[in-house]
Each structure stands twice: as C-alpha cells, then as structure tokens.
Image: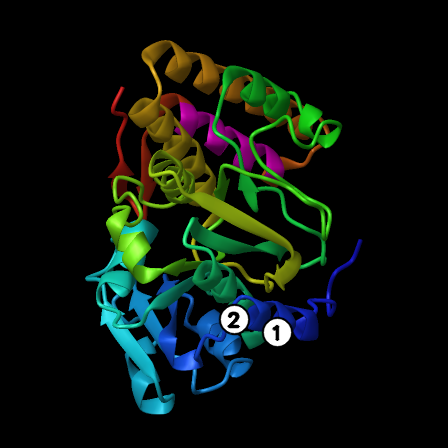
Amino acid sequence: MDLRGTTGGAQDGAAAAAGGAVAIGDVELVLVSYRSGHQIRALLENLPDELPVVVVDNASDVDGLSQLPAQRPNTRYVDSGGGKGFARAANAGARTSTREFLVFGNPDSRPQLAQLLALVGDVAADPGLAASAATMAGVDGRVELGVGGWEPTAVRALVHAAGLHKVFPRAGLYAKPAPGEALEVDWTTGACMAVRRSTFVDLGCFDEDFYVYNEDMAFGRSARTAGLREKLRTDVIVPHAAGGSGAPSLEMLRLRGAAMRRYLARHHGAVAVHGISGVLAAGYAVRTVQCKALRRTDRAAQHWAYVKGVTTGRATVAGRVVMERIR
C-alpha cells in the first residue's frame, strides 16, 4: 500500500487531544545531523516556528547549521565536537533540554506537527509508557522493515536470515506492520519517537556504547527491565525523504552488523552471541551470492558489508574506527 500523503493529520491531532493537552512549548524536537543540513532545513519547513528544536551537529558545522538559531525562533544548536555517533549526540540534546517531552527525529523524516503531538500525548497520558513511536514509510510510501522489533533469539535470527519473515512477519527480528495493525513490540525505532525527558534520563538515555544502530533496541530493553513499555503507533505514518542522512551506505551497513554483535555481546551469553551472529552472517552471505548472480553488485556489496560487521564486530566511519569487537 502506498502511504504517501495519507498520514492522517486530523486523526493524529484528535489522538493528541485524547492523550491530554500538551502545550507545544513543552516539547522539543531533537535532531542529530551528520552532513544532513539540507534534510533538516526541509524537515523544519513543514513545522511551525513555535515548536522548540535542538540540532546536535556531528559534522562540525560543515553545512552551516550553526546559523539556524538566527534564522528560526525556538531553535538551539549544539556542536557535539564531531563524529560522536547518534546515541551520544542525541543524549547531549536530551540532557541540555529544559522541556518536559522530547521527540527524537531523523533528519530525513517528514513528520507533521499533529503526529508529533499524538506521540507525545501517548507518553503524557500513560506513566507506564517509556516511548511512543511513529511507523516509518520509505520514499515509495511503503512501511519500512525495522520500525520496531523483538529481542534477538536464535529462532528469530534464523527466520530473518532465511527471509521467512516475509511469510511470518511476527516471527523475525524486525517488525513491518500493516497500517493500523495492532502490534506489540519489545522496542521501537528512534526515527520518530517521543519520550518524557525525565523518564529517558532515569533509564540512562541511549546506550553510548552504540555509535549508531541498536541503541533503540537497548533502550527498549532498559524500559522493559524497569517495568515500562514502548508503543508503536501503526496509525501514525511518517515518511522518509529521498537522499538519506548523508552517511555512506556501506559504512552504515557494516555498522549495523557490528552494532548487532555488540548488542548480543552486551546482553546475551557467549553461545547466543556466536550462534545468532553466525546465523545472520550465513544468511547475508547467501544473499550476497544471490545478488552477485543477478548482477546486483551494489546490493551484494551492502549485504557483504553487513557480514563483515556482524562477524568482526568492527566498523569505521571516514576511516576512523568507531566500534570494536568486545567478545
């Protein structure tokens, strides 16, 4: 189903009202940028100036984002010092905020104000809710795989590696729900996710051992440990824009694999680490061969980058090692 232009602003606004009145000044949108100034400017064009925004820059102002506060009211700029990764930069934005609620957003996400308030309304109304997240759609308008998911197990990893999640969509690692589908997940994506700032800080924020990827999975685990839940709003569809975040795709795919291995090493035993990592590596290696046979060389390179990440636990960004194997 193509979801472009059907994000349900009126419905989302009603949901926000039902969750309790939240003043726009009580919410701050947290955006982490890495060479993605063009995406952030396009995102903000569709949001009112009354909405507080903090931009945490991971690229040392290469695209002039430090000028945003002078161009847009209620905007803060934080220079992370460059190359700190998503988790650390997002935490810097959260810890320096004075607002009661935060919404973490990807620079290439395109939420409407009513959607942001709907997510915040969920958190405001339910003290047992650690986060409420939108369902993300790709540039083709279709719901993306990985808008949330479940704690990794050997069985779930096997289902994902074999591609069986396309047949059994609730049996793999990552969720891809139909719009409006009722679905309980263990964690939600941070691409458009609302939290109460005090709860986020009390839970330790995002785990800064993750440069990017799996910090959302780790946050979901922290929430469950504390007896809290996360909510995936499958009726709130937020599209991604074309162009991505500005980071090279092969680096990101290797980082994705390395982050998964690190998560497993942090929270699972040695047998599970090697077993789940091995299953995922084998699955993506098969996909690499298949893509090469079909002469889809770019896709094959991406799959192989993931294999290298999940087997070595090591990844780099711009030639700098940002993740090393810990088990």
Going 52% across and 68% down the picture, which residue do you hit?
A: 116
Residue 221 against residue 102 in the figure, above or below: above
Residue assigned mark 2: 117
Q: Quadrant of residue 118?
A: bottom right
Q: Residue 70, how many percent across, how many down?
A: 31, 90
Q: Residue 122, how many percent across, how many down?
A: 51, 60
Instruction: Say what secondary structure mark 1 lies in.
Output: helix
Q: What amino acid is at disc 1?
A: Gly
Colour mapping used in the image = rainbow
Q: What amino acid is at disc 2?
A: Leu
Q: Residue 276, how many percent across, how many down?
A: 47, 17
Going 65% across and 31% down the picture, which residue do you hit?
A: 170
Question: What secondary structure characterizes most of the magenta part?
Answer: helix
Q: Quadrant of residue 259?
A: top left
Q: Residue 52, how many percent across, how many down?
A: 37, 79
Q: Which residues are magenta?
A: 299-310
Along the viewing direction, whichever of 211 and 216 lies nearer the viewer: 216
Q: Is residue 297 left or right of residue 199?
A: right
Q: Is residue 226 visible?
A: yes
Along the viewing direction, whichever of 306 and 102 lies nearer the viewer: 102
Q: Is residue 304 magenta?
A: yes
Q: Is residue 93 left or right of residue 257?
A: left
Residues at circles 1 and 2 in contact by the CB criterion of under 8 Å:
yes
The span from disc 1 to disc 2 (Cα, nearest Å) is: 7 Å
Going 48% across and 78% down the picture, which residue do you hit?
A: 44
Residue assigned mark 1: 13
Instruction: Say what secondary structure mark 2 lies in.
Output: helix
